[in-house]
Image (tube, rainbow, N blue to C red):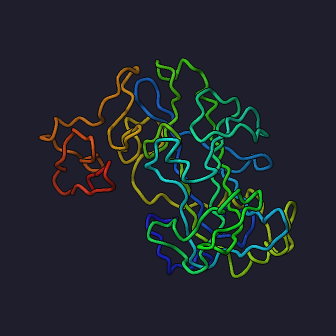
Amino acid sequence: MNATMDPAIDLPTASTCTTCTFTQDFSNYWTATLYFQARNGSFIRVKQKGNQGFESAKGGMTVYYSQPYDGSKVTAFKKGFRMVVGSPMYRTAAESSKNRQLTFTCLQDASTRTGETTNMPVLPCPAGIMSNVRFPTCWDGVNLDSADHTTHVAYPSSGTFESNGPCPASHPVKLPQLFYEVIWDTTPYNDRALWPSDGSQPFIWSYGDPTGYGTHGDYVFGWKDTSLQQAMDTNCQPGPCAALSEQSIAAGNACSKARSVNEEVDGWLAALPGNNPVTGVNPGAGLGNPSGGGTPTNPGTGTGNGGTAAHWDQCGGQGWTGPTVCASGYTCKVSNQWYSQCL
């Protein structure tokens, strides 16, 4: 996974290893990182932990490719296919409802799979928080991608993939259901005395979302040759799949990629990576928690529109009252109506 993903790159041939169980899978699976915000306003990255049966895995993501429960066939993703589900700008239940089945599970133990919510859990979770990312399962059959990385795919026109809901006429090709389970070890922060004094939950996505409604996932297909289609046709779930070869968890753990951005993301941080502000219902309005709780204030130290924003700092957006001029060498770039950043 790179910051820029050239569609011309063939992942199976460009990759030297994979962290996946199946050695034919060189796909890229991505979600944001979760942070804990302490009462003094500082942040620390929440570590992932392995799922049941994968406890020794360094990462906490389990990826599922599911066939329809009625036994009908699916068309596997094609070379060059990619998609995104969810939006980092969403902060309300109404917005998040546009993307079905993006949820959280407050784990009571490792086997908990009920009680999903679309918002971040509001109480301590005894075994951590699991984020669940289910992608659309219907494809237009033509475009491997789209300008927004979403409109070439769709959810069933009624029901769900699990209930064998039909695909809409605009997106008639049924895909496997791609589903991420990502387990975050929030247990070191279950003491409510560490949480904001107003009792609100303290976990923030790395892009500044404290609600959970902005959860999203990215997918770049990278299976070798026709191996995924063979696996789907075989319907080898659960259990070993004769169409695929497996590697050990230790072998997957040995596969890693060097950091490409020279920025500290671990340890206690004064701000989220990239100086992303914590934002509420109107992203960009800067609804961060000040030290010790209390009334939220705009992030940054600028003095109104006359100040200067440093590299990576916010420099504009609807509701923004901080500096709009970037430090020498940087330009204020518009990300959306709510947020501009010095880059």
Is residue 203 in view from this perspective?
yes
* Residue shown at 41% from the left, 57% from the top: 261
Picture coordinates of residue 169, whole percent (x, y) = 63, 73
Relative to residue 207, is residue 184 drawn left or right?
Answer: right
Picture coordinates of residue 318, whole percent (x, y) = 27, 45
- Check the image and report above or below for 14 versus 213: below
Q: Quadrant of residue 253?
A: bottom right
Q: Quadrant of the C terminus?
A: bottom left
Relative to residue 283, is residue 252 drawn left or right?
Answer: right
Which residue in the rendered view is the most extreme toward the left? 306
Picture coordinates of residue 74, whole percent (x, y) = 75, 73
Is residue 16 in view from this perspective?
no
- In front: 19, or 120? 120
* Residue shown at 67% from the left, 68% from the top: 167
- Check the image and report above or below for 26 versus 46: below
- In front: 215, or 264? 215
* Residue shown at 71% from the left, 51% from the top: 57
* Residue shown at 75% from the left, 57% from the top: 249
- In front: 143, or 65? 143
- Check the image and report above or below for 115 versus 132: above
Q: Quadrant of residue 180?
A: bottom right
Q: How many marks?
A: 0
Relative to residue 246, is residue 61 drawn left or right?
Answer: left
Relative to residue 272, is residue 343 drawn left or right?
Answer: left
